[in-house]
Image (cartoon, coloured by chain):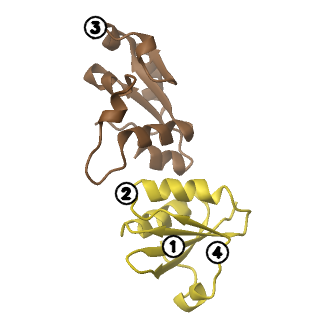
Amino acid sequence: MPATVTESELQAITADKVVDARGSACPGPLLEAKKGIGTVSVGSILEIWSSDPVTKTDIGAWSAKVGHEFLGVLPGEGYERIFVRRRK
Amino acid sequence: MACAALASDVEVVIGFQADGVELVRSGVANTIEAPGFPPFRKLLADFQELGGKLLVCGPCIKSRGITTSDLIDGAEVVAAGRFVAEITSSTNSLVY
């Protein structure tokens, strides 16, 4: 699932909520995203931190399946920052 | 897979038969950890929290000396007819 915003646009985003799933293996980060998205309002942005490199594709596929917007990924130090906008 | 499916708004039922019934015996989940995966107890807790159903074969537990009270909360003891109904009414069935 392709990202919908550019990296420079992602850099400017301040997420409404950050979920730290670093150290968690599949399906842990996805489950944390599922829990986290339910705590923000529609239109808000959830940022998931994951040290598992497959999480970004997992979250992208999940977003498409359930109807959220996969915004993209930024590199962190030893982890990735994955951005999703709640759409429903 | 089951937890990921639930997180994706897919209804999931897990059926335990034969030696698989040991997995939902109280305390057993605490003893299972596979490298690279979350602990089984965590996956099982997440599965139930997300609304997944656990069905357990009645004859299978009886033949192993397991009683209903030995099973974790939420595990439902059923027989073959229920398994058949669940499988034939589902969109997809996976067997491990």
Secondary structure category for the residue under label 1:
strand
Residue B91 image point, x, y percent:
47, 39
Task: Look at the numbered discs 4 and 2 and tell me whether their residues touch, using CB distance below 8 Å.
Answer: no
Residue A36: x and y, percent?
61, 58
Subunit that carries the residue with mark 2: A
Instruction: Name which residue lies at 29% across and 54% down.
Output: B36
**Amino acid on which disc 4 is placed:** Ala
Residue B73: x and y in percent read 51, 23
Residue where numbered disc 1 is placed:
A82
Q: To which residue does mark 4 refer?
A: A15
Q: CA distance from mark 1 to mark 3?
A: 49 Å
Can you identify the residue that label 3 sits on? B63
Q: Earlier in the sequence, mark 4 or mark 2?
A: 4
Binning the other alpha carbons within 10 Å of mark 4 as few (below 14), some (14 to 19) or many (20 upward) gives some
Assign a secondary structure to mark 3: helix
| Residue A15 against residue A37 in the figure, above or below | below
Q: CA distance from mark 4 to mark 2?
A: 23 Å
Looking at the image, which residue is at 29% across and 43% down? B33
Kind of element beneath mark 4 = loop
First in sequence: mark 4 vs mark 1:
4
If you read the primary sequence from the N terminus, does the residue marked by circle 2 or circle 1 appear first? 2
Q: Chain of mark 1?
A: A
- C-alpha span from label 4 to label 1: 10 Å
Give the percent coordinates (x, y) of residue A48. Answer: 53, 68
Who's yellow, chain-wise?
A
Q: Secondary structure at mark 2?
A: loop
Mark seen at residue A25: 2
Please name the amino acid that badge 3 sits on: Ser
Name chain B's colour. brown
